[in-house]
Structures are given as C-alpha cells and as structure tokens.
Amino acid sequence: MLVSADGSFRQRVREALTGLRWQVRETKGGAETLASLDAFPTETVIVDSWLPDLEIAEFLAEVRRGHPAVDVVMADASDAGGAGVRSPRRNEVLYALERAQSHEVADDSRKKPAMAAGEGPEVRAGHSLAAASAGAAQGPWAGPGRGRNGGEPGAVGLPEFVGMDPAMVEVSRRIRLVAPRHASVLIEGPTGSGKELVARALHRLSGRSARKLVALNCAAIPEALLEAELFGHTRGAFTGAVQGRTGRIEAAHGGTLLLDEIGEMPLGLQAKLLRFLETGELQRVGENEPVRVDVRIVAATHRPLRTMAEQGTFRQDLYYRLAVFLIRTPALAGRREAIAALAQMCLGRLARGEPAKGLTAGALEQLMGYSWPGNVRELEHVLERAWILAEDRPEIDVGEIEFDVLL
C-alpha cells in the first residue's frame, strides 16, 4: 500500500516496486488507506510524512492498533515509531525508495541550470539507505549501493546485485523472465562471480519463495556419498547408515534445489538425476518404493558444460534438461565500472562493530587496474586483507593492497 498525496512520488515508487514483482495499491490519504487495509491483505505500507486528512502520528497509531502484522515504512526511510512488524522483504522496499529518490534528483538536475562546484540538489533526509539496508545484504553482490552506476535509463536491477552495467541488467532481466516459471535453469559463470546469488534471486521471485531453497555443492561431497546425500537413504542402506536420512531433493519439496558445480557430478549419478527430472520421482538408497517430489532444479557451474556434453564427459541429455533457460554471470574483469561500488559495499560489511575505513585514490586506481581472476570473491579477500594491514588508519592505501596471495 503506497500512501502519498504526491502523484509523481507514487509513480516512481510504484515502478520500482512492480519491477521487483510487488503488487501495489495506491491511496492519497490516511482514511482511505485504513479502509483499504480492512479490505485488502497487505504486507507493507509506505507512507509519506504528511497526509492531507490525518496527523501522521494518529495514522501510525491506527495502523498499529488495527493491523499489527503490517510493516510500515516511512517514505523518507525513517523509523515509523514501532508500527507493525518488519517484513522479511523490507530491503526491497528501501531499495525502491532509494531508486525513486535517485530518479527525482535526476529529473531535478535536468530542469535546473548547472551548479557551482560543491553545490547539489536538496534531497529528503533519510534517503541515504546504506545504514538502513546494510543488515539485509547477503553475498558478494548484495548491498544498498546498487542501481546508480551508469545503467541505462529505465533499467531496473535486483537488490541482490551491485551495479547497473549492461551485463548485470541483462542478468536481472533474465531472472525476472524465468523466475515465475517451472523451467529448469542453468547458471554458468566463473568462480566467485555470484552464481548462488542468482539462484537466490530466482527463488525469491518465484511462486516457491515461501518454501525452502536447498543447496548442494556436488564438488564438496565424496562420490560414494553423493547419491545418498541427493536422494536420501534408509537405515542400514550402506555401512555407517545407522539411521535413515531425507535427501536434498526431498528436503526441497515445494521449493527450489540448487545443484552447485553440477559439472563435477559423476556420470552414473547423472543418469539417476535425469530420471528424476523426467518422472518427478526418486528412490531413496536402500528403498524400492518411489517418492514423488515437486521441486524446481537450478544448476550452476563454472565449467563449459555444453563442451563437456559434446566431449562425452557430461551427459548430453541431462545438459539439455538442465539448460532449458541459461543465465551467465559475468566476470568482474568485464565490469570495471562496478568495482568502486563493490569495494564500498565490502568495506561497509567489514566495518560492522569497527570504525569505518575508506580507500585512497591510489588504492582504488590499483583495484580498478587489476584483472580479478577470482572475481568478486577475490575482491572481498583482497579488501579484508588490506583492512587488517591498515591497522587503525582510517584509509587503505596502495601499500595495503596485495594481489599475490593464492585464493
């Protein structure tokens, strides 16, 4: 529920939210909103700091009294006085507000004459959301700095990803297209480029988001145990199986299963996975009766799976079942314009509980000039090492940036 007498503000926030697959209902005043809350199930209310018919404190008290399960977010991202609860997707709402504000500033700058050095457009207090949303960030691309790094006008990224360079805009677009469908998805990209974050975004935007996203790294489990880990087993099915166990496929029933590093799966087990994909039924190790499971399969790999299929080192029929829809995560070397924002996000995470640190111009230039074979994960490691080497100094300089440590 979007509550504001400002129609242009409502439009900007609505466009950002619908891009994140929210259903938005708009109201202009407090009384209309309270009536709508009685009629329509609502997860979150975004309310402007001024209403034409009610004092904002009165409105918040009424929402708190009549709809305590509704998350209330002020349009300036300030505290709503404890009204309601915090939605698990509040970070998306904060991102939509930040995006709406950035568009407002951009529109104003086009209307005004050029400003002298040091001047800048006035913005609403509280719309810098770095502190507000840092706690919800996850993974190497997550964070509040995304969305304003030179992206195309009208392009909408996802809150999981930092940067609006063309490669990431295309990743976000493909995620939105396929997320609502049941189709299997194959995510290809170099190590450390954010494939798991793509899988999480797919799950979050799907109709399965209320159920689990279960991940299995096929390269991290010995071949002898991988089948039981995937399909489950009964008690006594093999030496050491002192009790039965539900497999990862079954644990993801109703949700999404991420098979990470699928290229490492043994050929024999690939045949059993293919049969599950074709029938929707699995057999636990040591059991004869099949079990029907409803799960969406998302696979990820850093290896050239199609080439492997052509060479016979990966089953060709399984490849085509997995690669119904392909998403490629780009290497960081091709996203240099995003390095500054990624570095800022990483340093923000490192600052939790410690004084913040920045980068000197020389240190940033050094980061920009590196090839990043380990991608975003390597950037995180380099910055954490530099943070430690900088000791108590407020800035990381060139001397603290080290690239020659093996990942």
Image (spheres, rainbow, N blue to C red):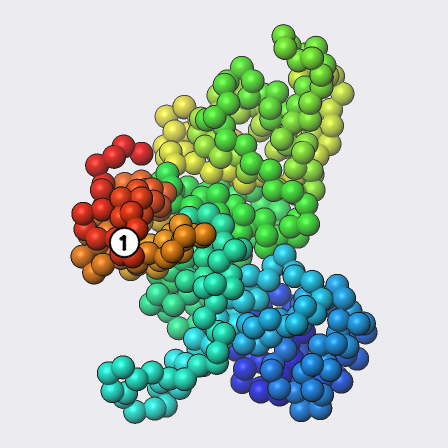
Q: Residue at point 61% right, 59% down?
A: 89
Indicate left or right for 59 with 92 as reference: right
Reply above or below: 168 against 242. Answer: below
- Residue 90: image quadrant is bottom right
Please give the name of the residue rendered at 39% of the width and 73% of the height, measured from the top-left corner.
153
The residue nearer to you, when weighing 291 against 241, is: 241
- Image quadrant containing the N terminus: bottom right
The residue at the point 57 percent across, 76 percent down is 75
Whether residue 372 is visible to the viewer of this picture, yes or no, is no
Residue located beneath label 1 in the image = 393
Residue placed most toward the observer, 385 or 301: 385
Q: Identify the amino acid type marked 1.
A: Arg
Quick one: SS at disc 1?
loop
The residue carrying pointer 1 sits among few (fewer than 14), some (14 to 19) or many (20 or more) residues within 10 Å by Cα, namely some
- Closer to the camera, 280 or 134? 134
Which of the image's four quarters has the C terminus?
A: top left
Residue 11 position, x and y percent, is 56, 80
- Is residue 174 left or right of 379 when viewed as pictured? right
The picture places residue 13, in percent across and down from the top left corner, at 55, 75
Give the number of marks: 1
| Residue projecting furthest to the top | 239
| Residue 96 makes an appearance in the image | yes
Q: Work out which residue is located at the far front of the displayed protein and give it.
A: 392
| 189 versus 85 height, above or below | above
Residue at the location (36% across, 53% down)? Answer: 347
